[in-house]
Amino acid sequence: MANLPHKVVLIDYDPALFAPVGNEAETLARVGASWETYQLRDPKSVLEVAKDADVIIVQSVRPLLTREVISQLTRARCLIRAGAGYDSIDYKAATEYGIMVCNTPTYCTDDVADHALSLMLGCLRHLARLDAAMRRGEYARHLAKPTRRLKGATLGIIGLGRIGSTVARRVKGWEMTVLAYDPYVSQEKADELGVQMVSLEELLGRVEFLTIHCLLNDETHHLLSRREFAAIQPGLVLVNTARGPIIDEAALVEALQDGRVWVAGLDVTEQEPLPADSPLLQMDNVILTPHVAANSPESRVDLYRLMCEISTEVVNGRVPPFVVNPEVLSHLRG
């Protein structure tokens, strides 16, 4: 396969949950492309193995595809983020150099929605601390308090894309009022989900439960900070399965300490892995999981299938699905 005319390189992946399925090389060989996989940790190493690749894929959120790297890619026509968010790729640099950027937004929609609701219910019913107490030999029924009933409560969703919409559909039978903030979604579209679109300010002032499903970019970095936490109803249940830096973590810690945020369920944090001295680790009103919301056997298969489909379109000279920088199509690299 070394003599194949095209080259697809996966520069970083999670071996614990999202290792290659095993049929990628055979699939891509049919269209004349080789398949190479690496677990790189720095941009310099990326250039050593991918400088002449047609397609470069990154699975982790490490900043490996930087402007400096992208400027030295001699053949790249497409950069793929194996996930929905593409903040680990310098989108602007890729666009300037005529390189398409794609994501894979459909592979884990159900899984992340399920995990978000699992965290919400776990927070509401204090499952983590009750389980921990039982394992310590404590029959600590008082730790089940305080709680509240879901029926009749108000849920807020930040980001009404594929995952946020799936959450809205999941909770239809829970008899909750559902509000959403997403400046790119119309009320007409939200009507199909039974969701009311509101401003971020109105949402924060009305909801008792809040789940985050937007991308991380310049607009959403620290979207929730001290100003926003000051506007919420005290006693908020907050869930984040999107990206850690959407929340100002220092401001969240303060809100957890003073009760404005009653309990938080976090699959993502500003720094991953979470530092050993993080105050979040000492709080029993926080449930933490290690960025695993996308995990399922089905999502792994779907992820690699999508990566191969996008790569196939690129090496065949076609525009693939899920191009997130469509402005590049006017000056694609030849």
Image (spheres, rainbow, N blue to C red):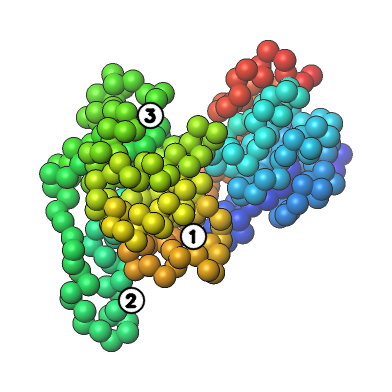
N-term-proximal mark, 1 vs 3: 3
Question: Where 127 sits versus 63, above or below?
Answer: below
Question: In the rendered structure, are the residues bearing label 2 and label 1 in contact, judged by CB atoms less than 8 Å apart?
Answer: no
The answer to whether residue 10 is visible is no
Residue beneath label 2, please? 132
Q: Which mark is residue 182?
A: 3
Give the distance between the C-alpha atoms of the residues marked 2 and 1, in whole angstroms: 18 Å
State the image coordinates of residue 109 (x, y, percent, origin top left): 42, 41
Residue in the picture at 39% in, 56% down: 254
* Contact, mark 3 vs mark 2 (Cβ under 8 Å): no
In 3D space, how far apart are the residues under numbered discs 3 and 2 (Cα atoms)? Answer: 37 Å
At x 24%, y 46%, the residue is 233
Q: Which residue is mark 1?
A: 290
Q: Going by the image, does 60 lie left or right of 108?
A: right
> Measured from the top left, where is residue 251 in percent x and y?
43, 51
Q: Amino acid at mark 1?
A: Pro
- Mark in the foreground, 1 or 3: 3
Badge 3 local density, few (<14 within 10 Å), some, or many (20+)? some
Viewer-closest of 204 and 243: 204
Q: Label 3 amino acid?
A: Asp
**Above or below, comparing residue 117 to residue 81 in the picture:** below
Q: Quadrant of the N terminus?
A: top right
Q: Is residue 111 left or right of residue 244?
A: left
> In whole angstroms, how far apart are the C-alphas of marks 1 and 3?
26 Å
Residue drawn 68% across the image and 13% down it: 330
Residue 207 x, y percent position in the rendering? 24, 42
Q: Secondary structure at mark 3?
A: loop
